[in-house]
Every structure is written in structure tokens, then in C-alpha cells.
Amino acid sequence: MRSFGLNDVWYLLIATQWTIYLTVVAFLVGGALGLWLAVVRTGGSRFGNGLALVWIRSFQNTPLLVQLFLIYYGLGLFGFRLPPFVAAAVGLICYASAFLAEIWRGCILSVPRQQWEAADALALTPWQIRWYVILPQALRIAIPPTVGFLVKLIKNSSLASVVGMTELMRAATAINNATYQPFKVFLCAAIIYFLLCFPLTMLSRRFERQLDVSTRG
Amino acid sequence: MTYQFQFGAVFARAELLIDGFLLTLQLTVLTGLIGLILGLSCAVIRTYGPRPARMAVATYVEIFRNTPFLVQLFLIFFGIPEIGKTFGLRWLPSPYMAGLAALSVNIGAYATEIIRAGLQSVHRSQVEAAESLGLTRWQVIRYVILPPALRNVYPALSSEFILLMLGTSVVSVISVEELTGTANLIQSETYRTFETYALIWVIYFALALVLKGILDAIAARFIGRQKPPPAAAGAAHA
């Protein structure tokens, strides 16, 4: 049996880039989908709102792990032989879209009503109202919780290891199987995750404080 | 598509699923309670304790909030016995105990942050008024600060509780046979993978809705109905 050494740390760092790719893809695509859902949810259509709500709740009220299993095995049934990266990405995209949609809906709703009315009085079209008046203001409030969710997404990407995608967590499991020094291996993985997440957490807190000061003044 | 869905094979093992479901409930309630007690004490220490204790709690919270639960679980289940061995201790946690411990310390860290925000939301003037009435420091915390603080953060705590319930599924990875764990077992016996996970997906969904209903009812009974936020109230008028 070999021992946990520098080569293994290097291997973990290489695997970390897949954790980052997975998170970035889930965040960008899930974010685009989530923004659209948030706009639909705050629009007038009751039908659209209901449909968006069903999508959001079905990913918010079920474990991500079960979602990943369902997507990984479910899409297989329909004849798609998906590589684990794609299955994991699809799962995390759906998950991110649901949570980001609800975060951003709250931000859109917190823009004062008068802003909608004033924009309406200026004869802007519904899309212009959203794009030029509401979303820019909502964006400011949205930054701290969005960065906070990004941290959550990095952490939850570790579940992709369970459906066989080789990212940081799965690489750690593989090294553990070879060295059987779980404490060192997983501590090392934990430190890498911490180094990814903690700066973002601090950033989110700083944005929050800035927002606090600017809205108070 | 030529696949034929067969839920029958899965339903035939309903007993296993019920056991798994009960274990999920048990884990959720137990870790919820332990996490709440842990969070409450840590939040009080973090806000009013002496400086070294405050730093220790802050470190605990940041470590557990900034690493994945799966890593924490593996460190406790695989890592601690290894460390124990080097100190001559033979402690091998059962998967259930390791899962329970990992879930509790994890949720405790989140609860600490939430409750701390609640403690800070109580206005200074309240504390000053209580102090001028001659209440001791502990009395101020217990009777003046905690009740409104907990009321303020109840919604955040209850949604964290639901996330905890969903999070218990992860302990299936170390072969705890809660709902997801039994599903893993059933799908490996029946090869009805999609049907099995679809079924527990629905069960989790229903459980989340029921828990939310119960938590809202508790809020309505003991806290009074939450006022809707002003923005939503405005939208309702229009």
C-alpha cells in the first residue's frame, strides 16, 4: 500500500478544475434559466406562474442526490447514454435554476411598486420596464445572496461524485481507496473546498455590508 | 421509446421503503433538535461569550459552512477512526452514528449563523431598558433578547429544517438505510432503477410539503401569523 503524498495533492488539484467547470456551467446555464423563471414568476400570467412554480418546487423540495440519480438513470432509459459530466451538469443546472429563480424573484419584488408605475406612465413596454428599470435595481440587492448560492453550488457539486463524475470528491475517494489514509485525503479535499468557498463567502458578506450602508444612508 | 415502466416490483418492497422513510424522519427530527440546541448555545457564545470562545465558535461555523457535507461525513466516518487508531483508541462508529453526528454538527453551524442574526436584530434600546431595570446579563439574554430573536428567525430556521430533511439523503452514501439508502437497495435487487428513484422523489416531495405545513401551523399557533412583506402586500392590492 502506498502513502498519501505530494503527487496525490497534485491529482486532487487537477480534479478540482472539474469541480470548477461543473459549478460554472451549472451557475451560468442554471442562472439564465432561473432569471427567465423569476421574470415569469413576477409577470402577470397566472398560467406561466403556475408552471414555473411547479418546476421550482419540484427541485427545491427534493434531495439533489435523488435528482441526480433520476437524471442519470432516467435519461438513460430514453436511450441517451450520457457521460457522467453531462448528467451531473443537467442535474445541477435544474437545481440551480430553481433556487436562483426564487432568490431573484424576491429581489425583483423588493423593487418599490412606484418604479413599475413610473415606468409604465412613461409608456415603456413590459419588457422595457423589466430590462431598463426593474432588473438593474434588483441586481444590486441580488448580488450578496447570489454569491452565497454560488458557495452552496460548489459544495453540492461534490454529490456529482456519487453518479460517477470525477471531480474533487471522487478523486479523493479514489486516492483513499489506494492509500487508505482517509483522514489525510479527505482533510486535504476539505481544505481545497474551503479555499474555494471561503473567499466567496467573505465577498458575499462584504457586498451585503455595502448594501446595508447604502440603503441606510 | 420501448421501455416499459414497472412500478409493481418496487411496490412489492413497500415494507423496506416504509422502514427507510421512518429512519429518514427519525434522523431529521433528532438532528434537528440537536442542531437547534447546538446552534442556540453557539450563537449565544458567539455573540456574548468571551473573545477566545467567540473565535472558536466562529471557526467552527466557517469550517462547516464552507466545506461540502459529503467531505464532513467522510472525515467523521472514515477519518476519525484512523486518527483514533494513532492515539491507540479503537472507535469505529456505525454508519448511523456517523451520519447522525455529521448531520448534527453540520446543521448546528447553519443554525448558529441564523440565530446569531436573530440576536443581532434585537434593538439596543431593549437591552438598555432591561439593564436599567437591574436584570442580570443572563436574564437579559433569556427573557429580553432570545424570544423576539427566535421569532424573527423562525422562517429561516424552518426552511433550514426542510433542507436538513432533504440533506439526510446524503448519508445513504455511507450505507445508512434511510429512504434513499433503501431505494439504492431496492433498485439493485429489482433493476427498476428509474421507478424506484421516481417513487422516493415523490415521497420526499410530499414529506417536504407536510413538514412545511406543520412548521407553518406551529408558527401560526405560537408566533402569530407572519405579516407579508410590504412588496408582496402592495402587489396584492393592485
Image (tube, rainbow, N blue to C red):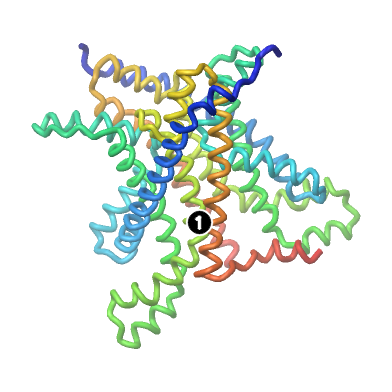
Whether residue A52 sits left or right of residue B138 in the image: it is right
Q: Quadrant of residue B119?
A: bottom left
In the picture shown, does residue B182 fall above or below A127? above
In the picture shown, does residue A87 fall above or below B114? above
Where is residue B56? Give x, y as percent: 26, 52
Q: Looking at this view, is B112 or A46 the one in front?
A: A46
Image quadrant holding the N terminus of chain A, namely: top left
In the picture of the structure, the residue carrying the numbered disc 1 is B156
Q: Residue at x 46, y 24 (%)?
A: B186
Q: Residue at x 48, y 40 (%)?
A: A151
Q: Quadrant of residue B132?
A: bottom left
Chain of the residue under the numbered disc 1 shown in the image: B
Q: Residue at x 31, y 48 (%)?
A: B60
As drawn, the residue found furthest toward the right would be A123
As drawn, the residue found furthest toward the left would be B88
As drawn, the residue found furthest toward the bottom would be B133
Say if residue A56 shows up in the picture. Answer: yes
Image quadrant holding the C terminus of chain A, namely: bottom right
Label 1 environment density (alpha carbons within 10 Å; few <14, some 14–19, many ≥20)? some
Where is residue A111? Give x, y as percent: 70, 58
Q: Looking at this view, is A1 or A118 the one in front?
A: A1
Whether residue A131 sits left or right of residue B82 in the image: it is right
> Label 1's element?
helix
Whether residue B37 sits left or right of residue B203 in the image: it is left
Q: Residue at x 49, y 55 (%)?
A: B158
**What count of labels does the image hold?**
1
